[in-house]
Image: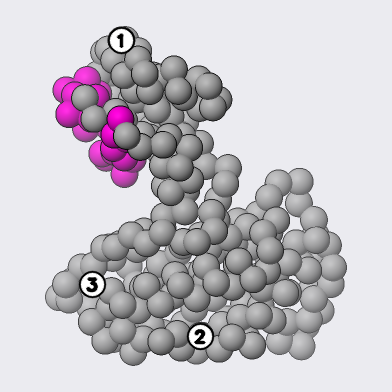
């Protein structure tokens, strides 16, 4: 059951979309003139936990597929066999074969550069086992170890699935950020993504909503608006 106040969330998303399109919005009695940016701003939730000890309490980690893709512009690279590389070329996705990976020669700087260039990687099943041998631990360290693409998977569907999937992972800090949309999306889709993301996080926590202190929602360049107290 979502503890988010739907009227508060609705108003917050309205204000974010208005602000990002250049309109003036009133927040906590202050007028804030909006500004339209020349890129599509991402909308994210910023969550602070409470009554949680990151040292003593069990760390949690979980992934969840949102119904609408929050960040469609994430860049993918296919580390593939011949068939997958051909398929990637057809749908205009960057790709690398075993030979291309061998050329990197396990050079840490080049692997780091590769990890930086893309947001995520897919790999064919016969390639995924070879990645540590070909590239060393670079992609794993960057948190970008490839997602498996089996021969029966549809590549475009898999790419969309990865783009829709959010991850909550407890580290040593009490704050978590997660993308739930962007300013070019329909308002209702942003609201649904936000509710589902917050509910999923609550389900991972020992005391569920009692472990959540505050939740703010904001666009990349916009003000943070509190939607859970």
Colouring style:
one colour
Q: Is residue 83 magenta?
A: no
Residue at numbered disc 2: 4
Nearest the eye: 63 or 217: 63
- Disc 2 + disc 3, Cβ < 8 Å: no
Q: Is residue 131 above or below residue 222?
A: above
Which residue is pictured at 36% across the width and 86% down the height?
Answer: 209
Residue topped by disc 3: 54
Judge by depth and name the residue closer to the eye, 78 or 33. Answer: 78
Cα separation between marks 3 and 1: 43 Å
Task: Name the residue: 59% across, 73% down.
Answer: 191
Stretch of the chain drawn in magenta: 127-151
Note whether residue 116 is visible: no
Observer-nearest of 45 and 64: 64
| Mark 1 to mark 2 CA distance (whole Å) | 51 Å
Query: Label 1 belongs to which residue?
Result: 99
């Amino acid at each position: 059951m979502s503890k988010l106040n739907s009227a508060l969330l609705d108003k917050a998303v309205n204000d974010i979309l208005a602000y990002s399109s250049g309109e003036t919005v009133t927040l906590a009695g202050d007028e804030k003139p909006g500004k339209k940016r020349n890129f599509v701003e991402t909308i994210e939730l910023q969550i602070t936990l409470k009554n949680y000890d990151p040292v003593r309490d069990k760390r949690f980690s979980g992934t969840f597929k949102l119904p609408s893709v929050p960040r469609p512009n994430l860049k993918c690279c296919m580390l593939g066999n011949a068939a997958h590389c051909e398929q990637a070329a057809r749908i205009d996705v960057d790709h690398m074969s075993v030979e291309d990976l061998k050329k990197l020669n396990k050079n840490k700087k080049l692997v780091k550069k590769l990890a930086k260039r893309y947001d995520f990687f897919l790999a064919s099943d016969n390639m995924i086992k070879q990645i540590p041998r070909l590239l060393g631990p670079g992609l794993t360290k960057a948190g970008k170890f490839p997602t498996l693409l089996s021969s029966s998977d549809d590549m475009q569907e898999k790419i969309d699935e990865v783009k829709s999937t959010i991850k909550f992972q407890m580290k040593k800090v009490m704050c978590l950020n997660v993308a739930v949309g962007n300013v070019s999306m329909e308002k209702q889709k942003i609201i649904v993504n936000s509710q589902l993301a917050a509910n999923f996080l609550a389900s991972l926590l020992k005391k569920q909503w009692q472990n959540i202190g505050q939740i703010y929602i904001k666009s990349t360049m916009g003000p943070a608006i509190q939607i859970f107290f």
